[in-house]
Image: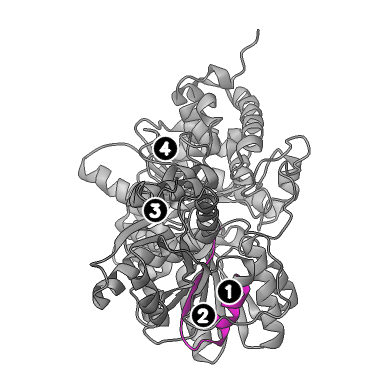
Amino acid sequence: MTISLLEQIQDPNDVQQFTIQELESLAKEIRQEIISSVSVTGGHLAPSLGVVELTLAILKVFDPKTDKIVWDVGHQSYAYKILTQGIERFRTLRQLKGMSGFPRLNESKFDHFGVGHSSTSISAALGMAVGRDFSKESSKVLAIIGDGSLTAGMAYEGLNQAGDLDRDLIVILNDNEMSISKNVGALSSFLSRKLSDQRFLRLKEDIKKRLRQVPRIGDELVNYARRSEESLKSFFTPGMLFEAFKFNYLGPIDGHNLRHLTKVLEQIRTLQKPLLIHTLTTKGKGYPPAEANPTRFHGIGCFEPETGQDLKPSKRHPNYSAVFGTTLCQLAHNNPMIVAITAAMPEGTGLNDFEKDFPDRFFDVGICEQHAVTFAAGLASKGYKPVVCIYSTFLQRAYDQVVHDVCLQNLPVIFCLDRSGLVGEDGPTHHGSFDISYLRHIPNITLMAPKDEPELQSLLACAVEHSGPVAIRYPRGSGPGLALSSQPIPVPYNQGEMVRTGSDGLIISYGSCLSPCLEATQSLAEEQILHLSIFNLRFTKPLPVEQLRSLIPEYSYLFIVEENSLLGGVGSAILEFLANEDLLSHLKIKRIGLPDQFIEHGTINELKHMLGLDAEGIKKTILETIGTKKLKP
């Protein structure tokens, strides 16, 4: 039986022994493996399909055992994971206890830096390069960054210092937007190939030395020669920007031409200066459905590999993102001051319809969360009502802007935090575990969370009416599927609600935790074990203190359930309130939430069960806390 090329790889350095023709065949095998595996596990398909040849070229020339390879975000790393960790391990991608969907330091010795958020690769790689130089090592350091990640300011901060330090650093720009036409790209590729030849580079350095020896005008002649070269390259290529950062720019290069990629990387392998290699790739390369719709296949669930069709049955009701988007459109029709802002996530945050209905009031700022927040603050200062739609984990990147530019000035910016709580297979870099903790202590901000879809509508309407900063958190996926309102009515500000009454204890539930709390208490009641009350908090800041003050003293047992870190979360807020009110002495209190650790990847249901946040876990905790003395015969 013939063994495939991929099965022959026992070590990533085996790639160096393959011919270009064999690498081209290997690229096809890798693509098939990525498509086959991701169709079962879900994941970031299109980005990784686009860099298969680039990955092979890197491993053909560089040694991942000594050279440091840093992937930006990690969406592009699947081919690298296959070649460094093996096929069988890759087939556990994003599964509980399986391979992470992103590079992680503690997962593989070949994952040289953990990632998950964008635009960090250049800064991390520069730090590695400086550390290498301190240690007098001779390894190479590479950062592979996409054109989307290059929209963020942090990438340019890294470029700026890297050029100034003049360290041995290679940045590879994976440009998959095809913004440069093919004919210009081909000519630029030809020029870059010649300009990257070592003989040419040595000749150029020799000429510089000789020019500097010319009395009085030597330096001026060198500067003139440099400007002439840059003008020629910049006329045909986008290299002027990177040359301004003191990088030697090579490209654009066909990112699917293995022979050319390998030759260029071999030519620059021995150079010891900041280099930027600009490659042009096709997102979703080799899989027609992904090439036709790269946005859909950027991050996708299970699908039929032959057709690209989703395997999961269509949802019976819209998810929270869609409910948010629909409601914002309803409110915007009646309020011309509402403006929507997203950071490169219009589809993920449910803003597609808003963009169509209100194109002049919709802004996608790219992967620039800090700018998005301060841009919103500027709009709010002019009387508008900006709604910043962003994933909970990504708002962490703009913390200072939330504090200084929005809350300090008490500006009415609304933060809609999608994917709060556990998000599933994307794991610890994407779980929205901390938003309550990092926002709650900021003065002036209001924090809300809905128990279901209609309450999300009502809280959004309440936020629009409020005169200060507001953050609304809601989870990934669908809620109970309750009917939506065509005219959302604001909930009373700073008011929770009793949703169930019982005499044996009180549960304070926040946000989407209400459903499993209801299921747990219903089971305890049906089994004639316990009858508990449930209070839907709605507001973490400010707390509905008058309601809590009159409600809590009625009970001996208090359970606080949240899908946020227990450190600094809802439970912490209520404990602070109880301490201030001197209401702790008679209470047995148990907090249920996320522990003080980074939560692994797995399905949301698996993770909730593991952490005791599903109905079964909540019921178990209640019984363990109250004990058996309440059991009825």
* Amino acid type at image mark 3: Leu
In the rendering, at what x and y percent does residue 541 appear? 40, 76
Corner quadrant of residue 587: bottom left
Find the distance from the CA under tag 4 to the CA under tag 1: 43 Å
Give neighbour class at mark 4: few <14, some 14-19, many 20+ (Cα, 10 Å): some
Identify the secondary structure beneath mark 2: helix
Q: Which mark is residue 269?
A: 4
Q: Residue furthest right?
A: 307
Circle 1: residue type: Ile
Viewer-proximal residue, 334 or 274? Answer: 334
In the image, what residue type sits under mark 2? Ala
Marks 2/4: CA distance?
45 Å
Q: Secondary structure at mark 1?
A: strand
- Residue positioned most to the top: 1
Residue 420: in sight, yes or no? yes
According to the picture, the residue beneath numbered tag 2 turns out to be: 376
Instruction: Check disc 3 and report the residue beneath it.
Output: 594
Where does the magenta region start and end?
Answer: 456-475
Which residue is painted at 54% across and 17% down in the image? 8
Between the residue at mark 4 and the residue at mark 3, the CA separation in whole angstroms equals: 46 Å
Q: Which of the two marks, 4 or 3, is nearer to us in this view? A: 3
Q: Is residue 176 above or below residue 311?
A: below
Most extreme residue toward the left is: 135
Proximity of marks 2 and 1: CB atoms separated by less than 8 Å:
yes
Q: Residue furthest front?
A: 633
Q: Are marks 2 and 4 in contact (CB under 8 Å)?
A: no
Residue, x 66% and y 37% (percent of image)?
39
Q: Residues within 10 Å of mark 2 (few under 14, many from 20)?
A: many
Instruction: Give the mark count.
Output: 4
- Residue 439 percent across, percent down from the top left: 38, 71
- Judging by the rendered image, the residue that carries numbered circle 1 is 341
